[in-house]
Image (cartoon, helix red, strand yellow):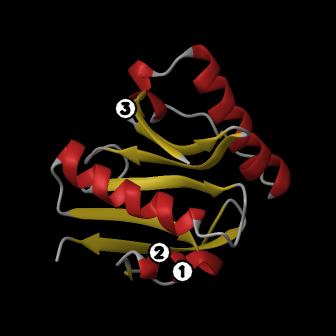
């Protein structure tokens, strides 16, 4: 499994198409949630994914401080093959990339509540009460460099 890390400006047309196709399939179709999946934050983001011969198997978007929160943020986390550790691996790579590429010591996320354990394993701590975002229960979580 190969890790790819690219800023939006470095993505090829085919890579961007594959990313958007996957994100729409999961966040719009599978979760039956009508919202603007492609947004104004993508051009400022780093896009990280794990791929094999079958294509993207895990993905996330890393945003710099100030894009959505005062800290860096991670979102759009997807593991195509679930229950195989890919979610945890891509989140860990996102935390590492945030430190190396952005030089940050804190990351904020809005996690779907059911995935809290995944993020806790990466060192995130719940920092809000549960709230609905696009009809799905979420919590805000924060990671701070030890």
Residue toward you, 16 or 51: 51
Secondary structure at numbered mark 1: helix
* Residues at discs 1 and 2 in contact (Cβ within 8 Å): yes
In the picture, the disc for residue 101 is none
- Residue 19, position in %: x, y? 63, 34
Q: Residue at 21% of width from left, 54% of height from top?
A: 99
The residue under label 2 is: 119
Residue toward you, 78 or 43: 78
- What's the distance in space between the residues labelled 3 and 1, CA to CA? 26 Å
- Residue 142, position in %: x, y? 33, 72
Residue toward you, 71 or 13: 13
Task: Answer left or right for 71 relative to 75.
Answer: left
Secondary structure at numbered mark 3: helix
Task: Answer left or right for 93 relative to 90.
Answer: left
Quarter of the rendering containing residue 35:
top right
- Of the residues under marks 3 and 1, which one precedes in the sequence? 3
* Residues at discs 2 and 3 in contact (Cβ within 8 Å): no
- What's the distance in space between the residues labelled 1 and 2, CA to CA? 5 Å
In the picture, the disc for residue 44 is 3
User: Alpha-carbon neighbours of circle 2 within 10 Å: few (<14), some, or many (≥20)?
Assistant: many
Label 2 vs label 3, nearer the camera: 2
The residue under label 1 is: 116
Secondary structure at numbered mark 2: helix
Query: Considering the image in quadrants, where does the C terminus appear?
Result: bottom left
- Residue 70, position in %: x, y? 25, 55
- Of the residues under marks 2 and 3, which one precedes in the sequence? 3
Q: Residue at 15% of width from left, 50% of height from top?
A: 103
């Amino acid at each position: 499994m190969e890790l790819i890390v690219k800023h939006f400006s470095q993505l090829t047309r085919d890579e961007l198409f594959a990313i958007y196709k996957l994100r729409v399939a999961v966040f719009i179709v599978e979760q039956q949630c009508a919202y603007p999946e492609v947004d104004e934050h993508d051009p400022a983001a780093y896009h990280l994914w794990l791929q094999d011969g079958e294509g993207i198997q895990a993905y996330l978007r890393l945003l710099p401080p100030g894009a959505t929160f005062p800290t860096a943020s991670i979102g759009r986390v997807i593991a195509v093959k679930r229950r195989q550790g890919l979610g945890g691996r891509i989140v860990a790579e996102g935390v590492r990339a945030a430190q190396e590429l952005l030089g940050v010591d804190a990351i904020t996320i809005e996690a779907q509540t059911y995935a809290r354990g995944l993020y806790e394993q990466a060192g995130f701590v719940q920092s809000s009460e549960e709230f609905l975002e696009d009809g799905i229960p979420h919590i805000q979580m924060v990671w701070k460099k030890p």
